[in-house]
Amino acid sequence: MKRVIQFLDEDNRPAVGKVDGESILVISDSRSVYELVGKAFNSGTTLLNQVDIAAIGYVEEYERLIRENRVLLPLTHPDPYHAWITGTGLTHLGSASSRDAMHQKIKNQDQDSLTDSMRMFQMGLENGKMANSIPANQPEWFYKGNGLMAINPGGTLTSPSFALDGGEEPEIAGLYVISPKGDPVRIGFALGNEFSDHKMEKINYLYLAHSKLRPCSYGPELVLDELPSHLEGTCRILRNKNTLWKKAFQTGEANMSHNFANLEYHQFKYPMFCQPGDVHIHYMGTSVLSFADGITLKKGDQIEIAIPEFGKPLVNTFAVQE
């Protein structure tokens, strides 16, 4: 799969390059993915084609960039106030056992006694996949912040001093730029750590909006190809370099109650989200959480999210604002 990253060169200037195994083939005539997207719009082509024809100036060692903490988010807007970060929940079916248990609970329980979350999940199961341009049921949706909330791969996710908790949410993020005509264009996908305050949300689901206003990360690589329908990944929490918690997860449309087309339709049906030039990072939902297994993150813990098709893992460190 074709993938690109953004990074700082040795002169501390932004750069963009194609991933070629353990090497980064640096694109000589562009300083950002956003600039490459603009060129693609102007030439009437795609970012994938623009990357294919780009001239290569020199080669960087990928591991060195990671070691020196020079890897950046794979897509940003020059003005962070023109980057929207949003997401959807209750989109994943989970493991076969949890899916069967969920189905049985819905089937055997009186509809009036179902929680709002369970009803939302049921709506996705019954009609969550858009087909033939006909919208399906809309998913849960939340606002996470603007570009100021996004932390580089390798960076620190700092939970604010007023937070009750901070925990990872491993998922896929769709990355978009709005064309000059106002059309949303998905330029690719990235690994995402949506990061939320699960204790706050647990008090009352109406606190969901508060719990989501936390930092997040995505990357390090931007996948330019369409994704396989079935993807398998792992999420790990490391404490003092030892694995504290590890869990496999499944994602991709085969493991979701909503498809990407439906999530995208309900995101971009709002005119304010279709302003030319704006960037959107949209988290597609998760199926595993260390919080659900009783894990409480501590300062210095590392969160590692990996899916082989996405290249290098997304790694961030946890901290609490003092």
Image (cartoon, grey):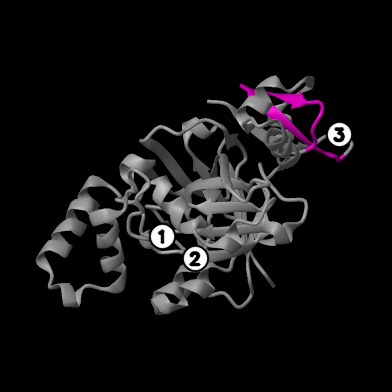
The residue carrying mark 1 is 89
Quadrant of the frame with the C terminus = bottom right
Circle 2: residue type:
Phe
User: Is 13 above or below relative to 192?
Assistant: above
Q: Residues within 10 Å of mark 3 (few under 14, many from 20)?
A: few
Circle 1: residue type:
Gly
The residue carrying mark 2 is 142
Q: Are marks 1 and 3 in contact (CB under 8 Å)?
A: no
Question: Regarding mark 2 in the picture, which secondary structure is present there?
Answer: strand
Q: Using the rendered view, name the quadrant where residue 274 is placed.
A: bottom right
The residue drawn where x is 59% and y is 59% is 273
- The residue range painted magenta reads 12-31
Would residue 202 be seen by someone viewing this image from the given angle?
A: yes
Q: Residue furthest front?
A: 181
Q: Residues within 10 Å of mark 2 (few under 14, many from 20)?
A: some
Q: Using the rendered view, name the quadrant where residue 91 is placed.
A: bottom left
Question: Regarding mark 1 in the picture, which secondary structure is present there?
Answer: loop
The residue drawn where x is 30% and y is 73% is 116
The residue carrying mark 3 is 10
Pointer 1 or 3: first along the chain: 3
Alpha carbon distance from label 1 to label 3: 40 Å
Residue 156 x %, y %: 66, 55
Q: Residues within 10 Å of mark 1 (few under 14, many from 20)?
A: some
Pointer 2 or 1: first along the chain: 1
